[in-house]
Amino acid sequence: MVFPPQANEIAKLIPRLRYNVKPRHRNLKQPLGPEGRINKMKITLSALFKYERIELYLPRCDEVRGYAERLITEAVRHGDQHPSTMDLANFFLEDKQMIHKLFKVLAPRYKDYQTTYTEMHLIPDKCHLAAEKKVACFFQECVLELKGNPYPPMPSKPKPNRESLTNILLREANKEFQKMKLKSESTESKN
């Protein structure tokens, strides 16, 4: 009698990614269908590994991030001597120099990482520009980058400080406004 493999045995066969990949791919519309979608992923992955920081729209950024995490995980885990990993890198990276960079530069850089290898930053909406052009853009723009890249860090949103002068003044102005509003409502109700 053959017993099914245990869950812990299966977990050893499949490398665990540090990034939660969605169970189904996003529907990125392409005129060429699924083949066009894969070609777009190849181009974007090659650009990510070449420049280490790229700007795209959120759906494609999220989709490419999963592919990049998988490629780097396989490269770190198996190296360039593993035929399946080489086939995977050869399929997804159109620029053959990027295959070399993946195994000789990025895999050694990330071998001791305990977190994700990529980072995604949302870019604030440019609503005023869209209003000037009278064009509506429904996708959020974002930046996808490989950690440890040579560029300066992306600016993060400042944490709100309740004790900053601006916030204190706004809080006091709000209190004054509420008092004035309450007075005007009470005088109106008397009349």
Image (cartoon, rainbow, N blue to C red):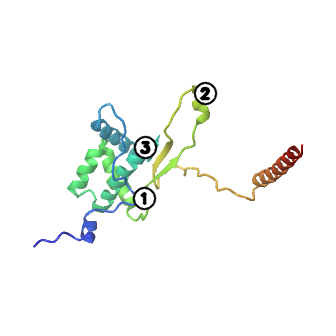
Up the image or down, 162 lies above or below 134; here it is: below
Q: Nearer the viewer, residue 112 or 5?
A: 5
Q: Quadrant of residue 15?
A: bottom left
Looking at the rendered structure, the kind of residue marked 3 is Pro
Q: Secondary structure at mark 1?
A: loop
Q: CA distance from mark 1 to mark 2?
A: 38 Å
- Where does residue 121 sit, x and y in percent of width and height? 51, 49
Other-residue count near label 2 (Cα within 10 Å), few / some / many at <14 / 14–19 / ≥20: few
Up the image or down, 8 lies above or below 121; here it is: below
Other-residue count near label 1 (Cα within 10 Å), few / some / many at <14 / 14–19 / ≥20: some
Residue mark closest to the camera, 1 vs 2: 2
Q: CA distance from mark 2 to mark 3?
A: 25 Å
- Where does residue 25 sit, x and y in percent of width and height? 34, 47
Looking at the rendered structure, the kind of residue marked 1 is Thr
Image side of residue 159 versus residue 152, left or right: right
Residue identified by numbered label 3: 59
Looking at the rendered structure, the kind of residue marked 2 is Glu
- Where does residue 184 sit, x and y in percent of width and height? 86, 45
Q: Nearer the viewer, residue 89 or 106?
A: 89
Q: Earlier in the sequence, mark 3 or mark 1?
A: 3
Q: Earlier in the sequence, mark 1 or mark 2?
A: 1
Q: Earlier in the sequence, mark 2 or mark 3?
A: 3
Q: Quadrant of the C terminus?
A: top right
Residue identified by numbered label 2: 132
Q: Secondary structure at mark 2?
A: helix
Other-residue count near label 3 (Cα within 10 Å), few / some / many at <14 / 14–19 / ≥20: some
What residue lies at 28% left-to-right and 49% top-to-bottom? Answer: 89
What residue lies at 35% left-to-right and 50% top-to-bottom? Answer: 67
Residue identified by numbered label 1: 116
Q: Secondary structure at mark 3?
A: helix
Asked if disc 1 and disc 2 are in contact, CB closer than 8 Å, the reply is no
